[in-house]
Structure formats: structure tokens, C-alpha cells
Amino acid sequence: MAEAHQAVAFQFTVTPDGVDFRLSREALKHIYLSGINSWKKRLIRIKNGILRGVYPGSPTSWLVVIMATVGSSYCKVDISLGLVGYIQKCLPEGCGPYRTPQTRALLSMAIFSTGVWMMGIFFFRQTLKLLLSYHGWMFEMHGQTSHFTKVWAICVRLLSSRRPMLYSFQTSLPKLPVPSVPATIQRYLESVRPLMDDEQYYRMETLAKEFQDKTAPRLQKYLVLKSWWATNYVSDWWEEYVYLRSRAPLMVNSNYYVMEFVLIKNTNIQAARLGNIVHAMIMYRRKLDREEIKPVMALGIVPMCSYQMERMFNTTRIPGKESDLLQHLSDSRHVAVYHKGRFFKVWLYKGSQLLKPCDLEMQFQRILDDPSPPQPGEEKLAALTAGGRVEWAQARQAFFSSGKNKAALDAIERAAFFVVLDEESHHYDPEDEASLSLYGKALLHGNCYNRWFDKSFTVVAFKNGQLGLNTEHAWADAPIIGHLWEFVLGTETFHLGYTDTGHCLGKPNPMLAAPQRLQWDIPEQCRAVIESSYQVAMALADDVELYCFQFLPFGKGLIKKCRTSPDAFVQIALQLAHFRDRGKFCLTYEASMTRMFREGRTETVRSCTSESTAFVQAMVEGSHMKADLQDLFRKASKKHQNMYRLAMTGAGIDRHLFCLYLVSKYLGVSSPFLAEVLSEPWRLSTSQIAQFQIRMFDPDKYPNHLGAGGGFGPVADDGYGVSYMIAGENTIFFHISSKFSSSETVSLSCSCSGLRRGCPLGPCLAGEGPLVVRTEGQGLT
């Protein structure tokens, strides 16, 4: 327990002779350096706050304005039109720094210049906000940009030409607009028309009209009022009611996973991979704290909202009986590590210096070499985060609110992130069809007790050096963690590197204190709760059917040659596959982002349209000419692209209806229309994974440096969850999930590897012609 004693700055003992003090110089040194580091961060935040607050202005531009005012005064030109003289009269006379006329004149000119400078900043910000509210550029055909849009783009570039910091554009981003009720109702009815017969549609149309005429006007007024008051009228309610108030287990139902590069391997040494990866992550966090990361820009012009990045590190979801809470700390100097049923605390700094990758590798190797067994109840402790939220909240309050259990739990919840040294080996072998699926399953839920599902993200390092992430969903959406992951993998591969033997570069410091083993005192009653949560989680994990594969015949290169959107192409293919699989269409969810607005998150694109169903039915009938099929496909693709653009520009359907529903609940107003809309199941939930948000390397020069994307569990018990990444020009990765317990779905079908094989959705892209599906039994292959 030497490391525990080192953590105490002083000890004292009361004796008959008095009080005996014992000081630890090393601990006091660490406290001193920690304080210095903390103040450095505060000063950096203050500086960044000032620079961010005056963007697109700068301290230099302020000095230029002052010099121009002073210079014009010496040239006997009053550019202030008498304001400087008026300010000078208002200053107190006869004492202090205002004693001489020259000082009073200079101070007056400085005050006037500062006012002009601040008015200029306000004007430029409002102008930029107005410019960013224009979204007509999104609806123009590629290569057919209007003169108005060209002038708009020049103005945006001019106003944002100074190098921005990460949050420089936040106050210039427009607010998410509240759509009109008639427009939302019209788009909703249009989206459900292909899913209903005439009688069902007439009934829904009647409910919608009644809602629009009677209930909606009152609800809309409250929603508009909220949009004036709040930064974003959707995001806070979305986070609270969709994520934090859900009482279902996070594992599978909410958390998602992310894979790494699957076609290359830097090293097989588990501790070495983690050494470089953890170091790169803290480098990213340092850039994040200093706001040195460039904002993501659409087309290199339009800034995306960056607020979700604020809670990437040092964040934990705290369970509650009715609602969870996201706990975010300004800083954390350690990570929590799990290995063979034991929890450790690993410091990331020595004093104020970040540990080198080789030092981190040594620390992780010490954990791997530690032969100590788990304490009673420790091995499956993390199953509490995988089970029901109410049970976890009650156990946390009963058994972890005091003593050593509270201290150990704090070490995990206050960590920068969670790390797992896994005992299994996983990787992608193109010759083994099941390998990618097994890799995905391991990241999605592991063995149900070796992931801390409450942390903002968990880094999983498998025994053979393969890596991945399991990510909690409430704090941010997938593109945010994807941004981090691209930086980390690029930094590890192209900047940090490894020795010829696969270890981190450099020589470690053997004098570093060993990782600290967390101590627990888990009573028998708590172990029973842990076992109960474990059984719930195991039942959920065993029910998940996951099939991941790489589609090789073509990618976005060939799709773009067909002059269509790759995303629309895949979405229409999924509609065809689902119809072949189920013999009917279903409500389809595709996530799009609304980050062009301040604090925007996501909106739903309802991909099952009348145009896409017309194409699918024509394909299935098999009697249409090729030209007719191509025409139907183009119409379906054009419709999908238009819906996606509407969703991105704040004219979606579902977030507006969701907020109207919440307002109705607050007001105690009953709406059969909203109740029915919000209860409709999403039996096909889809999402495209963002890539190349950071240009860490040239993908044309390194074509094998491809991540396989990631995936999530099915949203509906009798539905599919489909995630896909259009990776480069020549390949697409698919992740398809469903539940074994449903007789309506099948992701895999065969007798090997404990997983059924044969894909119902993705391979519909294969075969002859643009979209051909081969059926086998009730599933698709």
C-alpha cells in the first residue's frame, strides 16, 4: 500500500506527549505542481474566453482602431463627430490619472475606440448569423451554384477568415427554427402514406386535421416562446426524456460501439497500443481544453456546432431512480482500468507533465503482470451499469455512498475515461466471415461486466492489441466520438509510432509509482443485486443478433458515377432488402444532424417514401423496363436527398412533434394524434457513420487505413438496427442487429461460430444490375 501512503500529504498522531506530524515532501510537491497546472488551465480558459468573446475581432484589431482614432486626432480630423470631446467632459477632473488634459484626451479616445470596436464585432456577428441562416446552397444541384450563393459564400469566408478557435462560431450560429404546424403535419402525412391503406390513412388524416385546428395552436405558442428563451428548443428535452429518463439498460439499448482500423495493425502488444492511444487521447483533450481544434466546417465554409465536445472527457452518467444525471468535471488526472475482475487507478501525469507513451505502456503492463485476485464481489461489479437503471440507483445509494466503496466508485466516476484490458482476442479476418461480427459483439456488450457503460466512453484493448470503443449516448452523438477517434488513430499511426519490436518509443521511468488498486467492501446483499443485474444484462446480450461485414464489389466511387447520392443509394437498397425480407414496408429512421444550428443534435429522416416504395415494388415485380426502373430510382433518390436537406435545415418532422407532445404533457392536454405518432415503432433504424472529419492523412495514399465504423442494437424488438460506413471509393461496411427472440427478423443464419449467418439487408447491393437481392428461406443472403 505504498502508493496509498504517497497520496497523503501529511499524517498526524495524537500521543500523551502531544501531536506528532509527518510530512510527505513528494506528496506536497505533487499538490503544488497540481495547483500550478490548475491555475495555468484557468488562465488559458480566461484567455480563450476573451479571444472567443471578441471573434471575429481580435486584440490586434482593437489596437488598430485606437491607433486610427489617435492618429486622426493628431491630424486634426475628428472622426468621432464630437463624441471624444463629450466623453472627455464626462470624465472626473483634478485628481488621479485624469489630472492632465493629454491623459484625459487619450483615455477618451480609447473609450470611443473600444465602443466602436465592440459595435463592429456585434455588427459582424449578427451579419454572420444572418448569412449562416441561409441554407439555399444545400438545395442547389452539384455544379449549378447560383450567383446569389456564390456571393453568399464569399461574404461568409470574409467574415470568418481569421483563424477561428473551436467555439468561436457558437454565438454566431442561428437558433433552430420552429417549423409551422401545417408544414409538419403535411410532411408527416406524406411520410406515412405508403405505410397505410386508404382506411388507415383517412383515419390518421382526420386525427391530424383535428389536432392542427384545435390543439396545436396553443402548444405551438408555448414552443415558440421556448425557442425565444432557450438556446435550442429541442436539445435539452431530447437529452432528458430520450436518454436520461429512460429506465432500460444502457447496454445494447443506448450505448453504441466504434471499431478501429481493421485492414492494418501497428502492434500486437496490448499494453503498447494502450500507451500510445491513451497518450493521444490526452493530447486531444489538451487541444480541446485550449480550443486549438478547428471547428468542423461543411464544405469548408459553414461551421458546425461544437458544444457536444465539451463533455467528451471527465464525464459519467450517474444513475437515478427517476432520471439519470450527467456529471462533468473540468479536469481529471487519471483513468480507471479494469483487468481480470480488478479495478485500478492509473495516473496520467507526473507533476504537471503528461506521462510519455512508454511510461503509460509500463503502467498498463504492471496491471497485466499483477497476479492478485479480485476482491469478493469486485469481478462482476460493472454489471450494475449494464442492468436496469433503478436497481443500479438503489444499489449505489445503499452500498456506495460512504467509506471505501464511495472512494473507489469516485475514482471510476471521476476518471477521464474508462479502460479495459480485455482477456479475449478479436480482429477482422477477411477470410473469416464471422470475425467482424464477433469483434462487434465484444465491443457492444463484452461479457456484461467488463465495460463501465456509464462512462462517456470506454476504451477496449483486446489481448492481441486490437482496439475499440463503447460509448454512452446521452452526452453526444456518434460524429463527436468519431472526431476524437480519427485524431487518436492518426496520431498513433503517423506521429507516435512503435519500435521494431512493437513497443512504444522511448525509455520508461521505472521510478513511477505503480497503478493503485481500488479497494472495495461489497456485502452479500450487494453481491445479490450485482448478480441480478448480470442476469438481466446476459439475457439482453444473448438475445442480440449482430452481423457485420465488408461489402467489396463497389463503393461511393461507382455510385457517384451514377450521379446519385451514396447515402440515398444505400437507403433505397435497404428498403428493397427489407421488403424482400418481410414482404411489407415499415417506418424507417435515419439520423441526420442539425449542427448547423446552435446546440443542434439530430433530426429524423423518414426514408420510406412513396417514391422509394414505387421503385421497390417495380423491382420486385420484375416486369419493368430498365429505363423505367432507372427513372423510378432517380425520383426516389431525389426525394430522399430533399428530405435529408430539410431535416438538416430545421424543417424535419419528428423533433417538432416530440416537443409538441412534451408541451401537451406539461399542460395536461390530451392529443390522440400525438399519442399515436409517438408510439409508432421504428422497425428499421439506420445511421450512416461520419468519416474523414480530420485530414490526419491522405486516404488515397493510405487506402488500407480504414476504420470499419460501428453499430448499435435494434431499436424495436421486432426490428433491425443498421449502421453503415461508406468507407472510401471502393467499399462499404455494414453492421446489422436484430433479436433472436423475434420471429420477424434475422441478421444471420447458419450453424457455425455460435452465430447465424446470412445478411437480410446489406448484400442487397450485390449481384447483377443496380440492386439485386437473392433470397434464401425467409432471410436474405
Image: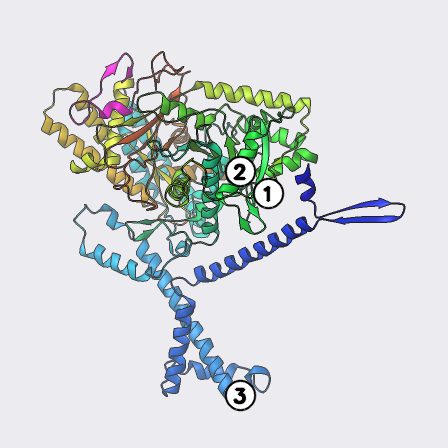
Front-lying residue, 527 or 185: 527
Q: Mark 2 highlights which residue?
A: 362
Q: Is residue 354 above or below residue 548?
A: below
Q: Is residue 652 magenta?
A: no
How many numbered marks have been drawn onto this rendered protein structure?
Answer: 3
Q: Which residue is mark 3?
A: 100
Q: Nearer the viewer, mark 2 or mark 3?
A: 2
Which quarter shows the N terminus? top right
- Contact check, label 2 and label 3, Cβ < 8 Å: no
Please state which amino acid type lies under the numbered disc 1.
Leu
Q: Position of residue 218 (x, y in %)?
A: 42, 43
First in sequence: mark 2 or mark 1? 2
Name the residue carrying label 1: 512
Q: Mark 2 is on which residue type?
A: Met
Vertical order, 755 against 769 (above or below): above
Determine if residue 223 is in view: yes
Report if the CB atoms under discs 2 and 1 are less than 8 Å apart. Answer: yes
Q: Nearer the viewer, residue 749 or 201?
A: 749
Residue 584 vs residue 354: left or right?
Answer: left
Residue type pointed to by label 3: Thr
Q: Residue at x 29, y 62 (%)?
A: 158
Please determine whether, in this image, residue 426 is positioned above or below residue 477: above
Q: For the residues marked 3 and 1, what is the alpha-carbon distance in whole angstroms?
A: 62 Å
Specify the segment rendered in magenta. 760-781
- Whole-percent x and y of residue 192? 30, 29
**In the figure, residue 645 lies in which quadrant?**
top left
Classify 762 as above or below 111: above
Query: Sequence-wise, which precedes: disc 3 or disc 1?
Result: 3
Q: Residues within 10 Å of mark 2 (few under 14, many from 20)?
A: many
